[in-house]
Amino acid sequence: MTPQIPPAWVLRHPHRPFIALHLPLAAQVPVYIGMGMEGSPGDPVLATPVVLVALALQLRHSLAASRGARPAGWPWTLTALILLANVPLWWLGSQWEAVAVFSLASIVMLLRGPVRTVAACAQILHVPVMEVTKVWHAHTIPQALLSGVYPLLGLMVFGGALVAGARLVLLLDELEATRAELAAAAVGEERIRVSRDLHDLLGQSLSAISLKGDLALRLLAKDAGAARAEIESLTGVARDALRDVRAITRDELAVSLRTEIDGAAALLGAAGVDTRLDVAALPPLSGPAHDALAWAIREGATNLLRHSEARTCAITVARDRGTVRLEIVNDGVRGVAGPGTGLAGVAERARAASGSSAAAVHDGRFRLSVEVPEEGT
């Protein structure tokens, strides 16, 4: 059977049904006294204030236990509750057992170690011993012993329900806090994803728009037709960027390794960079590995345009013993993007695909390398 999920208000306010659990126990005392459960009916008015005091003390203990704490001055309030629960028992008998339930629950909630065990056993045995003592001479031994079984079981069941209820409220509060933390973490991760994707996406798109705009300005006086073609191409890049931004916000952006390679080659060619491609045999890749290489191509081209005056660039994709290695090497380095830029996003995507990445400058050449497993894990 499918487990029933508690109503939302119970999960948000678990202390409310927990408080309600105490009320029937307190209410039964004046009812039993008025009905005369042990002899002639009595006056419940005298017992009611005492029961209300016991209920207030128990609620103080229970609500503190539901927070995993003990209230201030608890030794005194526990002592008072124990006296209220046990002294009237010898006059009111089983009619007063509900208050003894409060005493047992508070003992278990507040005390620790061997003291709790001894005190709980004493409270549990007090009521049945009292009941057996009352009927010992009027009944047979089995009957007398049987008269103590009901209060014994009642104390353990109802006292255990209060203790378990406090523990359940504590667990539900912890669960709600954990859910809030997970929700906050998910929001943070989504913000990081959107920020990373926007950086990687718009970095190249804006570089292409800037490049094509400058080229159109230079061609405007010489070749109006070519300038018009560059402006039309610039408009297309802007439209594509807008479409991709909308896809990022819905987490629906799909990238293609082959498309990114071709786009990077065209963009670098338009920038006057002599680009050499060695990617003839692209192997089949898992989703994360494919995306990691595709985004690395995009970031590598963007990084080249922003941080170098490159004249040559080599993009290589090779297979080696179950891994696929991408390398982008260019000259004319002016600087290298530091932590917190697109290179951090490349490294993050590589790790998500169980791979690795590295970026280094040597002899005026910048090398970006990414390795991912050929088969999905």
Image: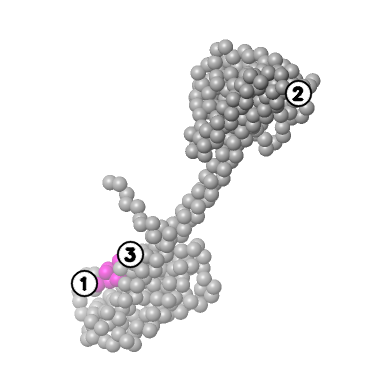
The answer to whether the residues at label 1 and label 2 have Cβ atoms under 8 Å apart is: no
Give left or right: position of 24 versus 269.
Answer: left
Q: Which residues are magenta?
A: 147-153
Residue 227 counted in the magenta span: no
User: At which x and y percent is residue 247?
Assistant: 51, 35
User: Dot 1, how many residues are within 10 Å of its Cα: few (below 14), some (14-19), or many (20+)?
Assistant: few
Q: Is residue 6 visible?
A: yes
User: At which x and y percent is residue 193?
Assistant: 56, 38
Image point 46% across, 70% down: which residue? 61
Residue 169 position by quadrant: bottom left
Q: What residue is shown with label 1?
A: 143
Image point 61% across, 33% down: which residue? 202
- Real-space Cα separation, disc 1 to disc 3, in angstroms: 22 Å
Q: Main secondary structure of the magenta part?
A: helix
Type of amino acid under label 1: Gln
Q: What residue is shown with label 2?
A: 309
Type of amino acid under label 2: Glu
- Identify the colour scheme used: one colour
Image point 38% across, 83% down: which residue? 50
**Where is 192 relative to 177, above or below?**
above
**Where is 309 relative to 120, above or below?**
above
Of residues 336 and 115, the one drawn nearer to the viewer in this rendering: 336
- The disc, 1 or 3, on the residue closer to the chain's N-terminal end is 1
Residue 211 position by quadrant: top right
| SS for callout 2 | loop
- The disc, 1 or 2, on the residue closer to the chain's N-terminal end is 1
Of residues 254 and 70, the one drawn nearer to the viewer in this rendering: 254
User: Dot 3, how many residues are within 10 Å of its Cα: few (below 14), some (14-19), or many (20+)?
Assistant: few
Q: What residue is shown with label 3?
A: 157
Residue 136 position by quadrant: bottom left
